Image (spheres, rainbow, N blue to C red):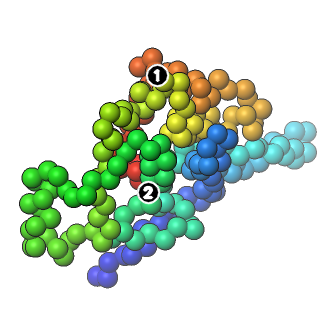
Amino acid sequence: MKPKNDMKNSYPGSEKIYVPGKLYNIQVGMRKVNLTDTVKIIDGKRITRHNDPVYIYDTSGAYTDPKIEIDLKKGLPRLRESWITGRNDVERLSEITSQYGRSRMADKSLDPIRFKNVQLPYRAKKGKEITQMYYAKKGIITPEMEYVAIRENLQNEMLGIKSHITPEFVRDEVAAGRAIIPANINHPEAE
């Protein structure tokens, strides 16, 4: 049996959209679900009411974007890398520093299964803190915080629903310890 190379998923009746950020140049993947019209028969007459689309989370990443080519050997697009490096608080290591990691890299028997684009890890620069909580407590709204706010809003403003979930609200919740944004600097592909 020939292996299937088409890794794309599609969901009929919906489409992948991207909602742009207002504070940062970010694109938040969402799913626009197109609803069918509501049809009622009243006094023998067909009455049709249009239903607006509904917007929901789309955490499928590149796997449902028809414009992105999937290559499992290259890995996922590094969506957040420019956000991480743009803060100038991190530096890339010159080599793998853990003994385990070095022994795995030296093991030639693993060469056939290695990813092509192995990235060296980042770390905080000396004297820097790089957690989302640190930035939030300093009053800084990060792209990650705006991303969360956009995703949580589910396009409510477009539907005429006022939302209190703003980037500032997300920052306040993170600073207070009521919300966590798991934004590992060495996994910039994570949404």
Q: Secondary structure at mark 1?
A: helix
Give the amino acid at mark 1.
Lys
Is residue 72 visible from the viewing direction of this image?
A: no
**Location of the N terminus (image quadrant):** bottom left
Give the amino acid at mark 2.
Arg
Viewer-closest of 119 and 90: 90
Task: Tell me the tag on residue 78.
Answer: 2
Query: Which residue sits at x=87%, y=39%?
Result: 42
Name, please, the residue furthest toward the front. Answer: 126
Q: Position of residue 36 (x, y in %)?
A: 72, 50
The numbered mark, 1 or 2, whose residue comes first in the sequence reads 2
Compared to residue 83, the image places residue 62 above or below, namely below
Task: Tell me the tag on residue 17.
Answer: none
Q: Is residue 17 left or right of residue 140?
A: right
Query: Which residue sits at x=36%, y=34%?
Result: 128
Is residue 61 visible from the viewing direction of this image?
A: yes
Name, please, the residue furthest toward the bottom. Answer: 2
- Residue beneath label 1, please? 137
